[in-house]
């Protein structure tokens, strides 16, 4: 029996996708072998790759002047790729908003290749809010502006899109495909797959065409967006099974009603959990209400001495991976697209019962 998985990543995948992959594992499309065992350049796999790209374009309404890349190295690889690809056209200066650990990792990597200007930071309140735009200290000559719309660890999600004059770059690893986005507002979007796209091992990058010729001359070939775009993301052997599974997730999302349906579902799921937490004296959320994440819900118990018991009992009840990140402690429930409403209902019921037993 499958349990309810609240892991922040690698995260839950849709059960229909897993069942289809299971059914096709040994004999894919009657070829007598797995999709993992055929050439990435074969007509059969090229069809898989092209459909995955088109389905993603459909889901996010990606304009024609953007390339869609399927890359290796995860979002962490793009922490390096972003400055490598965008620092070559002028000043090596970039603006970053610092909202937590993933933003910090991106900042540290960018500083290896140029100057980073911290536009704003929420470190003063332990990364529990998204800085307002009127607090920014922008540079005049930035090559790009980078932010993390949803911080997986801290559970903070921006309720606005930065309006800037330079290319806007976003790490959407933990909230991509959870709601409609205006892709045309961005110069580049990237996301690790292991939360809302598919299994770990692949990352998606959406890059506006005019940004493909701004790379530093010494850029590693494997990080060069133009090389990847010109080769159809196949300059080297790609992670074919992860690409195939991501494509199945895209098909599943379209069948559910697309990102519009996911937006409604995410509000329903997160609202249910936040409403329960706010109505309790036993649990609390550390994040300011206006920027609480729909994808990652951190919460703490009134007595942290009960954390270990809570996690043990939750696992016994079939509720997995609720432990908060080691850097912040407490609990965290990740409510990605593949996490059903029934999982949140079961979690709220368990939390209410645990509170009553400890009262």
Image (cartoon, rainbow, N blue to C red):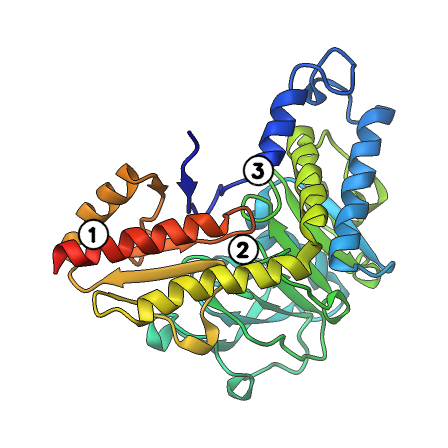
What residue sits 48% from the left and 79% below the top? Answer: 131
Question: Which of pointers 3 and 2 lies earlier in the amino acid sequence?
Answer: 2
Cα separation between marks 1 and 2? 25 Å
Q: Which mark is residue 307?
A: 1
Residue 119's spot in the image, x, y percent?
53, 78
Q: Quadrant of residue 166?
A: bottom right
Q: Is residue 14 above or below residue 59?
A: above
Query: On screen, 8 above or below 315?
Result: below
Q: Is residue 285 visible?
A: no
Using the image, tell me which numbered label, if any, was put on residue 199. Answer: 3
Q: Is residue 133 visible?
A: yes
Q: Nearer the viewer, residue 286 or 355?
A: 355
- Asked if marks 3 and 2 touch (Cβ < 8 Å), the reply is no
Q: Position of residue 341 (x, y in %)?
A: 48, 52
Label 2 sits on residue: 174
Label 1–label 2 contact, CB within 8 A: no
């Amino acid at each position: 029996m499958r349990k309810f998985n609240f892991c922040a990543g690698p995260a839950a995948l849709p059960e229909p996708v897993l069942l289809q992959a299971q059914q096709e594992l040994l004999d894919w499309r009657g070829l007598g072998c797995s999709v993992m065992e055929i050439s990435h350049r074969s007509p059969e796999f090229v069809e898989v790759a092209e459909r995955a790209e088109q389905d993603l374009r459909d889901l996010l309404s990606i304009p024609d002047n953007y390339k869609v890349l399927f890359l290796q190295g995860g979002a962490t690889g793009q922490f390096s790729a972003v400055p490598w690809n965008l620092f070559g056209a002028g000043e090596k200066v970039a603006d970053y908003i610092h909202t937590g650990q993933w933003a910090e990792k991106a900042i540290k990597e960018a500083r290896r290749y140029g100057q980073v200007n911290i536009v704003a930071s929420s470190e003063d309140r332990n990364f529990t809010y998204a800085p307002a735009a009127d607090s920014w200290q922008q540079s005049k000559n930035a090559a790009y502006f980078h932010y993390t719309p949803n911080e997986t660890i801290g559970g903070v999600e921006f309720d606005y899109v930065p309006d800037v004059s330079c290319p806007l770059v976003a790490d959407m690893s933990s909230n991509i495909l959870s709601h409609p986005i205006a892709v045309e507002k961005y110069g580049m979007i990237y996301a690790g797959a292991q939360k809302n796209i598919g299994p770990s091992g692949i990352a998606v990058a959406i890059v506006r065409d005019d940004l493909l010729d701004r790379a530093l001359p010494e850029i590693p070939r494997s990080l060069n967006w133009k090389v990847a775009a010109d080769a159809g993301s196949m300059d080297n052997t790609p992670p074919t099974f992860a690409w195939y599974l991501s494509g199945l997730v895209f098909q599943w999302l379209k069948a559910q009603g697309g990102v519009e349906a996911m937006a409604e579902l995410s509000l329903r799921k997160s609202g249910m959990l936040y409403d329960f937490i706010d109505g309790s004296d036993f649990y609390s959320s550390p994040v300011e209400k206006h920027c609480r994440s729909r994808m990652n819900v951190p919460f703490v118990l009134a007595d942290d001495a009960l954390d270990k018991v809570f996690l043990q009992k939750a696992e016994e009840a079939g509720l997995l991976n609720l432990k908060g990140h080691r850097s912040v402690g407490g609990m965290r429930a990740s409510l990605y697209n593949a996490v059903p409403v029934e999982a949140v209902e079961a979690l709220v019921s368990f939390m209410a019962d645990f509170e009553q037993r400890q009262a």
